[in-house]
Image (cartoon, helix red, strand yellow):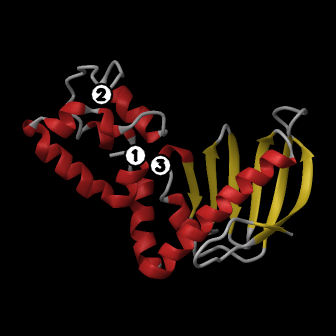
Amino acid sequence: MQKAREHRKKLVSAYEVIEVLPCTRDPNRIRLIAKLDHEISDAIPFVALRFPPGKVTYAEREGVLTLNVYDRLITLFPEGKIAMTYTKDLDEAKEIIEEFMDLINEAYEEAVERGKEYAEEYVKRLKSINWMELYKHLPQTNCGECGEQTCAALAMKALQGEAKLSSCKPLLNDPKYAKNLEMLKKKLGPHLCRALSL
């Protein structure tokens, strides 16, 4: 098993690649499954909260999280497996697995500190948020200061992690939108604000 970077309260510290197959999307790449040295069910909901909602598919009952990140799908299973598609080679897989191990360890620290009920509340928020919820709190002036043509486009792209809500200068700086900003922050909570760059 290979060692990950040092961390304070480690839940996982090693992994083993247990299966490597050709990628179905590109046969010159691989898909793989790695087994971590510990189950990760307590950490998974807190990992989900670190990504924009449009990148997250969380099957709560099964405890399985699939993320559409790094131009690939990465799935975390509660028993401590990580499945990954569209990977160049084992060296790239190692980098990503170690990054996810760090993320899992950080998420576990938060799980220990905050508890399961806290995660459940935020997972409900994560699942309920959509671009219309974001859009209704934006100024809806289509000013373009954020770099998008419309406020709706900003909302859709922010949900996918392709734009930052903080790029909406009127929302952040114009006093007439202060209530919108306050209501949006309250609706999202700190985790989703961070995930959506607000």
Q: Residue at x 55, y 68 (%)?
A: 106
Q: Find disc 2 in the rendering and name its residue.
A: 151
The span from disc 3 to disc 1 (Cα, nearest Å) is 8 Å
The span from disc 3 to disc 2 (Cα, nearest Å) is 18 Å
Q: Residue at x 91, y 51 (%)?
A: 20
- Give x and y (percent) for residue 57: 58, 52
> Three-letter amino acid code at disc 1?
Leu
- Badge count: 3
Q: Residue at x 31, y 41 (%)?
A: 134
Label 3 Cα crowd, 10 Å radius (few <14 / some 14-19 / many 20+) = many
> Three-letter amino acid code at disc 2?
Cys
Q: Nearer the viewer, residue 127 or 138?
A: 138
Asked if the residue under mark 1 is in contact with the one under mark 3, i.e. CB atoms within 8 Å, the reply is yes
Up the image or down, 117 lies above or below 196; here it is: below
Q: Find disc 3 in the rendering and name its residue.
A: 53
Q: Tell me which label, 2 or 1, sits earlier in the chain.
A: 2
The numbered dot on residue 152 is: none
Q: Nearer the viewer, residue 40 or 187?
A: 40
Up the image or down, 65 lies above or below 29; here it is: below
